Amino acid sequence: METNSKRLGLFGGSFDPVHLGHLLVAQAALEELRLDRLFFIPAAQSPFKPGVEPASPQERLRLLRLALAGQPACEIDEQEISRGGVSYSIDTVRDYTRRFAGATLFYLIGADHVPQLCKWRAADELAQQVQFVVIPRPGEPAAPLRPPFRGPTLRGFPVGISSSEVRERVRTGLPITGLVPPAVAEAIRNQRLYLNAP
């Protein structure tokens, strides 16, 4: 267990695939929140996306490693994939509060998830352990966090890229240049990922 007063960001998601929007959000969070480290935490299976897994966990991890190469403040935490099954945020947050006692935890969340926060597993405990950082969506006002939830909204510009858009472009043979890092685009092409993805 590390005892410290560090500022740690937790960025969970499917990352299926990781794209430049994720990286721009990460950079904005590092700068605006003055984070010491930002952990990308790919889900084994999202409770909100049952049955949807266009790429395997290992393929998604490989793409994340390529995307984050040369980003020393960003790390990949494989715990949810290692646990397997449906990933719940509270399990991961409990692990961080145990491993990094005294750290301030910032949990990045898309604005579209804010209205559902009260339905998350152990929502009250989550509200005590982390500050939620709302990632705005293009053209939409961010829903305000309501007590007991607290935290800021990223001021960085909203990014209009989605993983589903990237998958759809691959499936229909359209280029993904400018949507994902070049190394990720090359790996998707070489591994023939997302050709039949939903």
Image: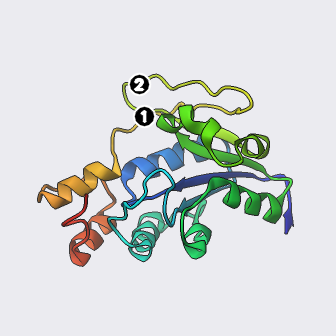
- Mark 2 lies on a secondary structure that is loop
Picture quadrant where residue 185 is located: bottom left
Residue at position x 80%, y 53% from top? 103
Q: Position of residue 67 (x, y in %)?
A: 42, 64
- Mark 1 lies on a secondary structure that is loop
Compared with residue 162, is residue 46 higher up or lower down, i.e. above or below?
below
Quadrant placement of the N terminus:
bottom right
Identify the disc placed on residue 84. none
Q: Nearer the viewer, residue 17 or 20?
A: 17
What type is the residue that disc 2 sits on? Glu
Q: Position of residue 175 (x, y in %)?
A: 16, 56
Quadrant placement of the C terminus:
bottom left
What type is the residue that disc 1 sits on? Pro
* Residue, disc 2: 140
Residue at position x 27%, y 69% from top? 188
Q: How many marks?
A: 2
Q: Is residue 53 left or right of residue 14?
A: left
Q: Position of residue 163 (x, y in %)?
A: 34, 52
Q: Is residue 102 left or right of residue 60?
A: right
Q: CA distance from mark 1 to mark 2?
A: 9 Å
Q: Contact, CB < 8 Å: mark 1 with mark 2?
A: yes
Residue at position x 40%, y 47% from top? 21
* Residue, disc 1: 158
